[in-house]
Amino acid sequence: MANKRLTPQSQDFSAWYNEVVYRADLADLSPVRGSMVIRPYGYALWENIQGAMDGMFKASGHENLYFPMLIPVSYFEREKEHVEGFSPELAVVTHAGGKPLEEPLAIRPTSETIIGEMYSKWIQSYRDLPLLYNQWCNVMRWEMRTRPFLRTTEFLWQEGHTAHAGAEEALEETMRMVNIYAAFARDWAAMPVMVGEKTSGERFAGALRTYTIETMMRDTRALQAGTSHYMGENFARAFDITFSDEENALRYVHTTSWGVSTRMIGAIIMAHGDDQGLIMPPRLAPVQVIIVPIFRNDQREIAERVLDASDRLRQELVDVGVRVRVDAREGLSPGWKFNDWEQKGVPLRIELGPRDLEAGRVVAADRLSGEKQPLGRDEVAGVVVERLEAFHSALYARAESFRDGHSSTVDDYDSFCKHIENGWVHATHCGEPVCEQAIQEDTKATARCIPFDGLEAGGGCVRCGGPTGYPRRVVFARAY
Ligand SMILES: [Zn+2]
């Protein structure tokens, strides 16, 4: 299937997305509606995301733990906004062991409630604080409309849950984690992100503040790639998480939660891919370099020499820390293999044939620029490491200039409606949820965030003319 042309992005972005997910072997349909099978190529990408992020969490003092998947349904009723936010999506186990259960058990849509219950036991004194825990797990939300990686009933994620003695410390943590997400996006996924706060209309159920990273896809729509929430005392009150402070007074803790999911894979696909397929950011790419030996099956001796040389080159690259494979599949033409790995988005391809072998060189092809260049055989390992770094920077720069070229600042509603067709719009807003709602009805755009380093608000609300609700402009966009 790999060599069938993809639907061009400009023709039907959504068809392009689905085709690339399946043809590049990231995922497959599952027999259960709305869930997906993540194949090895997609899972290796997730493992690289997970590894990079987990390192950042641990370096900032967090520890991993694991909670069970089943949560008593009654727990969800303790925090009012939380239950309203999640009850329509709950999948509930009512029977087990051939009998109805006394209390139905929800499959976790998120774990605040069960974690709250345990934290109330683990936290007694100010000496127990802060608790800085994270878990990597699966969750289930019964979504009606699903798409691979973007929205599936079951997905993989990490959820961090921390408890602190006071608001200031908890807010610092909320900010620390959204900044870690932003650094991950920039330094690993080569994705520029807008970091900011959600408007009250877009906040997480039960949160007082929600911080987010928003990134632009190649169809100019926005994708929320990670969020960090400050819960205040809401969950502490619902789950009775108290501690005695230095003066022996009983106080509620302040909690945070933060998460990134397999949606990040959808973001990487749509932020970087082109009409030929995926473009993998090199630092996360499951395969950074593919070596394609050029040989004919009817010339055994030459084929063996080429394969041997390819294998030696592979080992040299492994030794300098490059993730590399040799495509030695028989009966497939080099052109077919080139297309296959281009579709999978491997950053660099090295071609090695009998003539290259004699001339002491290889040919290197770059997935982003499409350029092909001969490299001296002895310099390959060094050059490849540099090229991968340069690839990362070029990919980031391309995404950033695309985003900036599709962003506008407007002061009146006519311009707003015009420019929202072209991408993101920075505008002054009153902060009223009904006004946000009206904008959404008119234009399908939602308030993505109030960027921390955003432009100052000025004049009245772009839609209703009312007084500004925030000191900075709000970014509106159509979103996934
Ligand atoms: Zn307004």
Image (cartoon, rainbow, N blue to C red):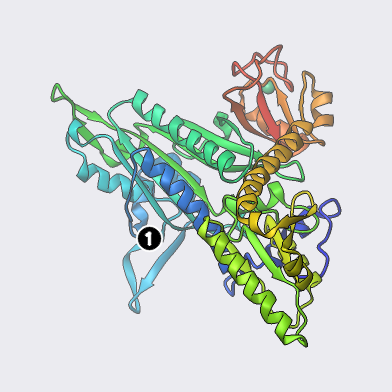
Question: Relative to 460, does residue 60 appear above or below in the rendering?
Answer: below
Q: Residues within 10 Å of mark 1 (few under 14, many from 20)?
A: some
**Could you say where residue 402 lies in the image, as x and y percent from the top left?**
76, 37
Q: In percent of the image, x 47 and y 53: which residue is there?
A: 50
Question: Relative to 464, does residue 303 appear above or below in the rendering?
Answer: below
Q: In percent of the image, x 44 and y 46: which residue is there?
A: 83
> For residue 219, which quarter of the picture?
top right
The residue pinned by badge 1 equals 69
Q: Nearer the viewer, residue 471 or 176?
A: 176
Quarter of the image where the N terminus is located: bottom right
Residue 297 visible in the picture: yes
Q: In percent of the image, x 81 and y 53: which residue is there?
A: 9
Ligand 1 quadrant assignment: top right
Q: Nearer the viewer, residue 97 or 243?
A: 243
Q: Indicate the amino acid at tag 1.
A: Met
Q: In percent of the image, x 51 and y 39: which residue is there?
A: 181
**Could you say where residue 122 lies in the image, as x and y percent from the top left?**
21, 44
Tally the marks: 1
Judge left or right: residue 243 versus residue 87: left
- What element does badge 1 sit on? loop
**Could you say where residue 148 lies in the image, as x and y percent from the top left?**
63, 60
Question: Relative to 118, does residue 406 appear above or below in the rendering?
Answer: above
> For residue 448, which quarter of the picture?
top right
Judge left or right: residue 77 versus residue 293: left
**Could you say where residue 56 lies in the image, as x and y percent from the top left?**
43, 42
> For residue 420, which quarter of the picture?
top right
Q: Nearer the viewer, residue 94 or 57?
A: 57
